[in-house]
Amino acid sequence: MWKYLLKRFLLMFPTLLGVAVLIFFLMRVVPGDVVEIRMSGDRGAVSEEILQQERVRFGLDRPVWEQFLTWLWGAVRLDFGTSMWTGAPIGEEIKLRFALSMQVAIMATLVAVLLAIPLGVISALKQDTWVDYVVRVFSIAGLATPSFWLGIVFILLLLIVFKWLPPMVYTPFWVDPWQNFLQLIWPALAVGYRYSAVATRMTRSAMLEVLREDYIRTARAKGLIEKLVLSRHALKNAMLPVLAVVALEFAFLLGGLVVTEQVFNLNGLGLLFVQAVAQRDYTLIQALVLIVSGFFIVVNFAVDILYAWLDPRIRFR
């Protein structure tokens, strides 16, 4: 087990290094001078002296390999430099937004899992009955409904029916947990519903496949009660593909909720991505892509650990 975990852990570093190399040099092959494009877009004609000062300020006058090593060493120390847009340290720009996006992602994942696993299991056990059809309609509707549109519906219903509008100014959890919950539960429900639709269909398919296996028939033939057959034999084996779907969706939520964040007035990482691109802030874009990629890699590592725990054949292979 430890050998398997060590191998998976060490694979994270070359993957992250590859992402860092790719994003850094892709930003450098963008046509035109980064500083010139940004400055001329903001202020019209700019003198060459000012452009050179900006290049020196951001270290763009040095050789590319030296820029990369400096940026990489800073990234290792979680120092991503200064934003070309605001002039503030990138770490400070990301810090609060990361906490907000992470909380929404965690809450949406909890909503999705609490909906998807029970509904997927019930749908598989009641295959081709009215219960199965209701669950399938529920999941298909979730796939067809954009989360930002559902968020707008939530706000309108709360306003028209209950004469109450969710808080639109973000309050950190450590300042006022209840106010924080009242604001973030609605985007979590909107995103979690769509998220649960994917996981529900995967749970149903995996359970149907597992329930046809020989070891399930053997367990039933030995006289095990149905509850033990489902929990100890069927569900545990069916969770492998479901776990992969849940983990990938969770990692995506960290920076992929641009429109939903705008609907609920949340200044998260998704909105920061759009603002960084609009402002041509290449240093901030590099940091955001690296952070989100690193988060994907860490989530995949956690999934590998859970895989090995759920299925011993994986760690012994």
Image (tube, rainbow, N blue to C red):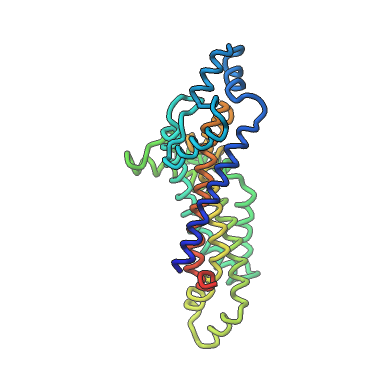
Instruction: Indicate the position of residue 142 as horizontal and vertical percent values.
Output: 60, 52
Asked if residue 261 is positioned above or below residue 108 in the image, the reply reads above
Towards the viewer: 46 or 176: 46
Residue at point 57%, 32% (across, down):
64
Instruction: Indicate the position of residue 76 as horizontal and vertical percent values.
Output: 45, 42
Instruction: Indicate the position of residue 150 as horizontal and vertical percent values.
Output: 56, 44
Instruction: Indicate the position of residue 37 as horizontal and vertical percent values.
Output: 62, 22
Q: Quadrant of the C terminus?
A: bottom right
Task: Quadrant for residue 242, please give it.
Answer: bottom right
Task: Quadrant for residue 45, please give it.
Answer: top right
Residue 116 visible in this rendered orientation of the protein: yes
Disc tally is: 0
In the orientation shown, which residue stands out farthest toward the bottom?
222
In the orientation shown, which residue stands out farthest toward the right?
31
Asked if residue 121 is positioned above or below residue 268 in the image, the reply reads below
Towards the viewer: 111 or 278: 278
Towards the viewer: 208 or 127: 208
Towards the viewer: 171 or 141: 171
Task: Quadrant for residue 175, please give it.
Answer: top left
Residue at point 50%, 51% (across, down):
13
Residue at point 41%, 33% (across, down):
92
Residue 192 visible in this rendered orientation of the protein: no
Residue at point 49%, 52% (across, down):
298
